[in-house]
Image (cartoon, coloured by chain):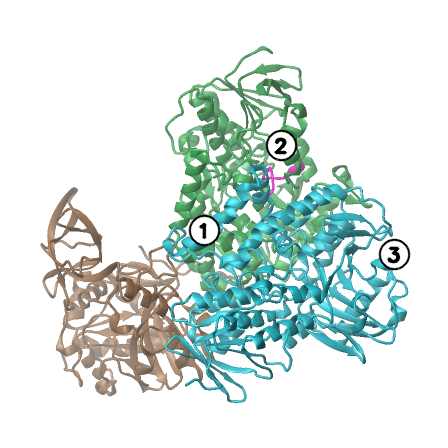
Chain colours: A brown, B cyan, C green
């Protein structure tokens, strides 16, 4: 997509048409050579700023900035915020302590995933949910009957993600060395109004900043100059997507369809099918979809999401998976060549019993388009249990300089 | 060892459905405790003293839909029959040629033959025939949808449906087609296709929509009339007021060994590990049990059990139930016998309707849609003291009136002014046919939907606890996913009018829910 | 062309359904004649120049429902049919604001949030339900309605198809589907949205063309009936036919001619000729008669059998059923020639949502009151309307710089009540003008200068539409879309498969399954039935054939 600018009108009641800017758009435009933008929740968001490969290697080698302001953010507070969230979420929310962030999933009454996200706990009764899908009406519904206030902060709180091995060094250079003590999933207000969480979407050392929309541009500038010493680059979505798959994180609309947005029936997937048994706490009392998930567990899963190591060197995005090269048993939901692992990796959905009882003799059919010619290859695949990218520096506290 | 507060089942609510559930369980040998928050049982079926020495039904005043299967199972059929008297219906006409409807026989009140008597008999006969077939569903659980409509789990219920289909087939192709055509239709068209508009179709239209947030033109009102006619539709006046029904059922409950406790409001239904464990009362008493059958509304029941125990969607459906009460009850205490123009004295004890045309009934509904008080409401009235002199003394009488299509809460609320305006509107409307009436009125007692809700707990003051619309019947009653009495938690069931088959004094939801509970292996 | 010409099939009425049936029959090799009472073809889908240089789509005015299978089978684009989606829509308030239904997804979300933040995601939920229901129902449109009273293999097959499709939905969705089909659009919207304005904007589709109010059960289905079409796969989208709705009829007419069919205009059917329970042909009002063993009527069921068929040729029970079929006039229309685009002071200049459907009804209660007026035989004092200016997109509709505006108005009774008497003749010129004034007064809510822009206006009441087009009571669907008149009940129980009690005679208009709207499905389905029963000709291989 080419550059799109927000169309604003002079009529008092009119809303902007087309894509609108995040607070970081001026900074992003200044470094954008590719002029390659996409629509992220109505905002102008970079696909590539310069060159996807260089941006990717900056994630794994230096430090990167990615604008996550379009994420949806909801403040959930009040005396019954805890019970309300406990009823909504599949995991035990009570185990997320104050000053911590938890990865969490929530389901509809049929146990199908509505979305996943991160839950920030600011105080005993004070949370913020950060997710990809708009969730305001659902939160209002889920809060009915509970003494809770839901505030949509999507357009008032900006987000910025600093990821990569030198990210702490960038922080320190920018005068934010106080974040040194943050362990993974810790959250702290390092300066008035500036919250930092040690979270991210790359599987590497990284931090996310949360700040008032209008104060956000200054934060970028504060990090940018000192960051240059540590190789800081701004990146777009395409580079991040590779890091995301390497780290084994799932993405909405790729690895699962958020059930509220699916028109067709049967497109929803349960946390169990997606491999998140550990984030479903059947013992904590009732939560939305619990009865359906119990029934699903009793009946046995009909499909599951797995990690695949794919033969050859050609990414398998969108490819079908076969058993014994004949029976179609699933498809790749996310597939890339991993430049770091030097492996051909993918997330894929397999019908039961494949991926469970049967793990061998699996094949994928890759269609390849090279310079005007289509080619079809059947290559073997292996099921992997561990993420394709794991590094001890991601967990080290205090973090290393690089 | 079983303590005094240990039960198999606690039934919440001492209305007739709660009593039917309690008796059904107790006669099957279960230890049952029935709790009622008020000091007296009965819900909408009570007799009260409205003036010294004058007693009358407080809310529901006529029986017409008691389920014979339920009465038989409860062993009270003969008693109820003996203690009630059948009444004809009179539909008042502005021109004085009032229409008497007695079963499917129609005539003028002056004894003259009604020109449409034959057409009416055919139509009423057909509706009754259809109603009887539909009525078979009311003592069965509605078809379950889990696992799809062809799964084995539903075969039992499908058999019920198949029997319904078979009975329809037996009607013959033409009648079956007619059934399928009109079943979901509106009563105005079905009546006016056969009859000229007037007090006769007016009366049938009024019966179709009484208690409903619907006018005769609303699709679904043929169904509501058939529901009313499901057990024949004969109108009977309970002797001693509607409290008679409650007394008979309460006696049956006690005899079956049921522990009945009044003045026992619920603090909460105790749920552990997705199962019912007991009921805590406001006085701190803990009743332990493995099942709770609640005749309170679904939302109220969920609140008692803790909203966190229910899925968001299930709760949302209950929040969205259509449950706007639409009828008010007016009781007039009269110093003497009421007399109606051009109505033979012998018919003054009949059920009397003011529903001059189908159009008028529809028009009567209009204001309620906008939160306005009715200006020309449809009325159903009966003077019970004429048939049952024991209710009164010193020559006084009672006129017991149902005012149709009253807003649940008018714009501005039920102020004193609104209440007296409604009372006056009703009296004026009756006085057009009974000029002497205003002079006889000694006292008037008005119960608005809000009052009825406050007294009985019926959601919205709605006498069916949830609108009997096509979108809220059978498997969808009270809402999708809750059509089988259960609300998800093991042991927690609805047993009131909001459950299948629905409202009116039938006893069926209570009895069905109890039988449904007994089918559970753990029960 | 002689008075004794013989054909394989004759179709009475050149509406879009009659033409569609004609096309399929002619393409199967039958010799087909279509007779039409007007001097033009198209029935209620016509474009006529009634004022110098301005083209009006006199009755139907926008396109969505026309089944894409039929468009492909009959290659209508080859004959000039072009449908352009419109760009949104708006409802204007009395106080200078509006709700804009932007086609841009993000802008729509922002606009909903401007009125009610809680309604933004609710709209997603609403659309999900509606589109799911559309996807469920669409396969049934080009099939016969299942008849549960019949044990004939074909009927059982249709019934099984329904059972299978329903079973595939799963428990929850079956429940939601049953509920959707029985609930009112008002209740359905109330449980999704908080904003009265947004509810009012969406509710119109639940009542357009019917004698029902927004709170009448079954109106959610009526909404579906307006959403189940598409423009190039965008379900629920609506568009303009370039050159007006007549472009559809003209394309069908051209297709029919090319397939060898004959159209005779200028004289309608006086009588369907029947001998010994078998149809033999038609006698026209001008005295001509034509013979054919197959005769199909595009007229509605009441007009066909109560006005143009000898009652002696019909079983009494059938005639009774036809008499009680409900065809209720409930809508009128204004076609307006404008000397310039009117001002919309509330909207940004050139706003794209002005190139869509515009309304001025701001609450469900307002819509319900409009219905209450109609029940009493009055036109709505505060009416609902669906207003468009197609000339903004389609240059063929008005002279350069000038504009054409179409205003569909609900409710207007067929039998207007004056002094306690309800009859169509009460639509005098004075009353027609008063009706138009009521509408113009309300249009001024969004276009204060509208009256000064009017060059010419055509006022069409249900009474006018009946007299010109031949639709009983001027009802746009040839029969109410209520439960008692849908699927196997449409138009008459036992006769839902396009056949009639008269051997060789068929109904092909919107009185039959799946009902009204410029869908052409009844016409295509009827052609399929005719060819099957007559065992004549070779049906084309196609999507709807």
Residue identifier under label 3: B344
Q: Residues within 10 Å of mark 1 (few under 14, many from 20)?
A: few
In magenta, the rendered stretch is C473-482
Label 3: chain?
Answer: B
Residue B209 image offset from top left, x and y in percent = 67, 57
**Secondary structure at numbered mark 2:** helix
Q: Residues within 10 Å of mark 3 (few under 14, many from 20)?
A: few
Residue identifier under label 2: C318
In this view of the protein, which residue sits in the foreground, C340 or A94? A94
Residue B481 in view, yes or no:
yes
C500 is higher (above) or lower (below) than C372 = above
Residue identifier under label 1: B159
Of helix, strand and loop, which mostly describes the magenta segment?
loop
Rendered-image quadrant of the N terminus of chain A: bottom left
Q: Is residue C480 magenta?
A: yes
Residue B18 image offset from top left, x and y in percent = 56, 72
In this view of the protein, which residue sits in the foreground, B8 or C291? B8
**Cα gap from disc 3 to disc 2, whole angstroms:** 43 Å
Q: Residues within 10 Å of mark 2 (few under 14, many from 20)?
A: some
Rendered-image quadrant of the C terminus of chain A: bottom left
Q: Is residue C203 magenta?
A: no
B283 is higher (above) or lower (below) than A285 = below
Q: Nearer the viewer, mark 3 or mark 2?
A: 3
**Cα gap from disc 1 to disc 3, whole angstroms:** 50 Å
Q: Are marks 1 and 3 on the same chain?
A: yes
Residue C403 in view, yes or no:
no
**Cα gap from disc 1 to disc 2, whole angstroms:** 33 Å
Query: Does A366 sit left or right of B235 as displayed?
Result: left
**Secondary structure at numbered mark 3:** loop
């Amino acid at each position: 997509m080419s550059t799109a600018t927000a169309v604003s009108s002079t009529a008092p009641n009119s809303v902007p048409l087309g894509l609108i800017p995040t607070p970081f758009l001026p900074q992003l435009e200044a470094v954008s050579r590719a002029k390659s933008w996409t629509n992220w929740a109505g905002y102008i968001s970079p696909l590539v700023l310069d060159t996807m490969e260089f941006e990717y290697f900056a994630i794994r080698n230096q430090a990167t900035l990615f604008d996550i302001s379009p994420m949806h953010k909801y403040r959930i507070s009040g005396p019954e915020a805890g019970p309300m969230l406990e009823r909504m979420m599949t995991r035990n929310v009570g185990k997320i302590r104050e000053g911590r962030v938890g990865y969490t999933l929530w389901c509809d009454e049929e146990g199908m995933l509505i979305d996943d996200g991160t839950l920030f706990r600011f105080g005993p009764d004070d949370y913020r949910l950060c997710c990809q899908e708009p969730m305001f009406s659902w939160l209002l519904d889920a809060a009915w009957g509970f003494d809770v206030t839901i505030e949509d902060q999507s357009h008032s709180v900006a987000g910025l993600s600093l990821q990569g091995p030198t990210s702490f060094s960038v922080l320190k250079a920018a005068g934010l060395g106080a974040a040194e003590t943050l362990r993974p999933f810790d959250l702290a207000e390092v300066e008035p109004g500036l919250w930092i969480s040690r979270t991210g979407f790359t599987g590497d050392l990284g931090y996310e900043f949360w700040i008032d929309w209008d104060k956000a541009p200054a934060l970028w500038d504060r990090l940018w100059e000192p960051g240059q010493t540590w190789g800081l680059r701004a990146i777009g979505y395409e580079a991040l997507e590779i890091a995301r798959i390497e780290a084994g994180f799932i993405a909405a609309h790729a690895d699962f369809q958020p059930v509220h947005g699916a028109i067709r029936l049967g497109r929803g997937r349960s946390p169990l099918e997606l491999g998140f048994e550990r984030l479903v706490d059947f013992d904590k009392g009732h939560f939305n979809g619990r009865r359906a998930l119990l029934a699903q567990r009793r009946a046995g899963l009909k499909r599951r999401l797995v990690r695949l190591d794919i033969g050859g060197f050609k990414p398998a995005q969108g490819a079908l998976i076969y058993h014994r090269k004949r029976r179609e048993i699933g498809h790749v939901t996310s597939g890339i060549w991993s430049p770091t692992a030097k492996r051909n990796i993918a997330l894929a959905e397999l019908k039961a019993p494949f991926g469970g009882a049967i793990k061998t003799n699996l094949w994928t059919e890759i269609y390849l388009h090279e310079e005007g010619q289509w080619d079809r290859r059947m290559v073997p695949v292996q099921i992997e249990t561990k993420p394709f990218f794991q590094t001890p520096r991601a967990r080290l506290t205090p973090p290393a300089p690089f | 060892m079983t303590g005094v507060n240990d039960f198999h089942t606690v039934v919440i609510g001492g209305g007739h459905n709660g009593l039917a559930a309690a008796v059904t369980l107790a006669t099957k040998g279960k230890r049952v405790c029935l709790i009622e928050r008020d000091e007296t049982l009965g819900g909408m079926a009570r007799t009260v003293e409205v003036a010294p020495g004058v007693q009358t039904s407080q809310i529901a005043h006529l029986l017409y839909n008691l389920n014979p299967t339920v009465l038989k199972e409860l062993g009270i059929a003969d008693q109820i029959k003996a203690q009630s008297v059948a009444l004809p219906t009179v539909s008042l006409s502005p021109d004085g040629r009032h229409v008497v409807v007695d079963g499917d026989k129609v005539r003028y009140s002056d004894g003259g033959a009604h020109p449409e008597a034959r057409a009416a008999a055919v139509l009423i006969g057909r509706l009754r025939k259809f109603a009887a077939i539909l009525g078979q569903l009311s003592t069965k659980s509605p078809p379950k949808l889990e696992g799809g409509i062809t799964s084995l789990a539903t075969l039992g219920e499908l058999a019920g449906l198949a029997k319904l289909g078979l009975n329809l087939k037996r009607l013959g192709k033409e009648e079956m087609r007619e059934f399928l055509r009109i079943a979901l239709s509106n009563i105005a068209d079905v009546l006016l296709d056969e009859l000229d508009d007037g007090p006769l179709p007016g009366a049938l239209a009024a019966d179709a929509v009484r208690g409903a947030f619907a006018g005769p033109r609303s699709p679904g009102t043929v169904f509501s009339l058939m529901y009313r006619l499901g057990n024949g539709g004969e109108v009977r006046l309970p002797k001693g007021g509607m409290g008679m029904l409650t007394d008979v059922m309460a006696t049956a409950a006690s005899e079956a060994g049921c522990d009945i406790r009044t003045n026992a409001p619920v603090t909460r239904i105790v749920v552990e590990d997705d199962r019912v464990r007991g009921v805590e009362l406001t006085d701190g008493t803990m009743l332990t049990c493995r099942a709770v059958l609640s005749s309170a509304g679904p939302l109220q029941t969920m609140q008692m059990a803790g909203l966190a125990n229910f899925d968001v969607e299930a709760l949302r459906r209950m929040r969205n139930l259509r449950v706007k009460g639409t009828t008010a009850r007016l009781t007039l205490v009269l110093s003497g016998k009421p007399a109606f123009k051009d109505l033979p004295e012998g018919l003054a004890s009949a059920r009397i309707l003011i529903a001059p045309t189908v159009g008028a009934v529809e028009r009567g509904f209009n204001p309620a849609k906008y939160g306005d008080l009715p200006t020309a409401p449809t009325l159903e009235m009966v003077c019970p003291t004429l048939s049952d002199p024991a209710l009164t003394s010193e020559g006084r009488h009672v006129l017991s009136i149902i005012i149709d299509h009253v807003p649940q809460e008018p714009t501005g609320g039920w102020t004193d002014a609104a209440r007296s305006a409604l009372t006056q509107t009703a009296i004026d409307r009756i006085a057009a046919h009974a000029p002497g009436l205003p002079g006889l009125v000694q006292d008037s007692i008005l119960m608005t939907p809000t009052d009825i809700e406050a007294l009985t707990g019926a959601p919205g003051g709605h006498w069916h606890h949830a609108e009997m619309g096509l979108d809220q019947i059978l498997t969808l009653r009270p809402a999708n996913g809750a059509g089988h009495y259960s609300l998800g938690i093991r042991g927690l069931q609805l047993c009131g009018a909001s459950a299948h088959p629905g409202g009116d004094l039938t006893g069926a939801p209570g009895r069905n829910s109890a039988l449904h509970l007994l089918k559970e292996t753990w029960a | 062309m002689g008075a004794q010409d013989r054909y394989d099939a004759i179709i009475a009425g050149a509406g879009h359904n009659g033409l569609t049936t004609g096309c399929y029959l002619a393409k199967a090799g039958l010799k087909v004649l279509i007779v039409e009472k007007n001097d033009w073809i198209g029935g209620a889908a016509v474009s006529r120049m009634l004022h110098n240089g301005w083209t009006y789509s006199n009755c139907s005015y926008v396109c969505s429902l026309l089944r894409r299978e039929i468009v492909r089978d009959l290659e209508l684009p080859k004959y000039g049919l072009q449908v352009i989606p419109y760009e949104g829509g708006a409802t204007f308030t009395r106080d200078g604001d509006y709700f804009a239904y932007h086609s841009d997804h993000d802008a729509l979300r922002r606009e909903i949030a401007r009125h009610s933040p809680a309604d933004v995601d609710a709209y997603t939920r609403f659309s999900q339900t509606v589109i799911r229901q559309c996807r469920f129902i669409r396969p049934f449109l080009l099939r016969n309605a299942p008849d549960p009273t019949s044990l004939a293999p074909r009927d059982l097959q249709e019934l099984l198809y329904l059972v299978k499709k329903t079973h595939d939905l799963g428990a929850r969705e079956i429940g939601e589907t049953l509920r959707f089909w029985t609930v009112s659009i008002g209740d359905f919207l109330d449980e999704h949205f908080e904003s009265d304005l947004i509810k009012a904007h969406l509710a119109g589709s639940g009542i357009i063309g019917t004698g029902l109010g927004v709170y009448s059960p079954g109106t959610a289905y009526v909404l579906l009936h307006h959403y189940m079409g598409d423009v190039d796969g965008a379900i629920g989208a609506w568009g303009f036919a370039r050159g007006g709705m007549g472009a559809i009829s003209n394309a069908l007419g051209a297709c029919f001619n090319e397939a060898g069919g004959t159209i005779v205009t200028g004289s309608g059917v006086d009588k369907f000729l029947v001998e010994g329970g078998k149809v033999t042909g038609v006698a026209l009002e001008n005295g001509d008669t034509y013979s054919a063993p197959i005769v199909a009527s595009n007229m509605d069921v009441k007009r066909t059998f109560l006005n143009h068929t000898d009652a002696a040729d019909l079983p009494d029970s059938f005639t009774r059923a036809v008499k009680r079929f409900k065809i209720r006039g409930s809508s009128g229309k204004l076609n307006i020639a404008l000397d310039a685009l009117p001002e919309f002071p509330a909207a940004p200049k050139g706003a794209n949502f002005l190139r869509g459907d515009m309304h001025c009804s701001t609450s469900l209660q307002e819509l319900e009151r409009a219905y209450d007026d109609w029940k009493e035989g009055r036109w709505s004092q505060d009416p609902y309307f669906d207003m468009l200016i197609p000339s903004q997109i389609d240059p063929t509709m008005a002279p350069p710089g000038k504009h054409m505006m179409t205003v569909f108005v609900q409710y207007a009774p067929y039998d207007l009540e004056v002094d306690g008497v309800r009859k169509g003749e009460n639509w005098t010129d004075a009353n027609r003008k008063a009706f138009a004034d009521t509408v113009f007064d309300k249009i001024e809510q969004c276009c204060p200068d509208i009256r000064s822009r009017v060059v010419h206006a055509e006022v069409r009441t249900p009474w006018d539409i009946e007299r010109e087009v031949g639709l009983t009571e001027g009802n746009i669907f040839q029969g109410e879309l209520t439960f008692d008149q849908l699927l196997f009940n449409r138009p008459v129980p036992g006769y839902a498969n396009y056949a009639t009690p008269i051997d060789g005679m068929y109904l092909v208009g919107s009185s039959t399954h799946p009902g009204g709207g410029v869908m052409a499905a009844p016409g295509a389905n009827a052609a399929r039935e005719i060819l099957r029963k007559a065992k004549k000709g070779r049906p084309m291989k196609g999507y709807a054939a």
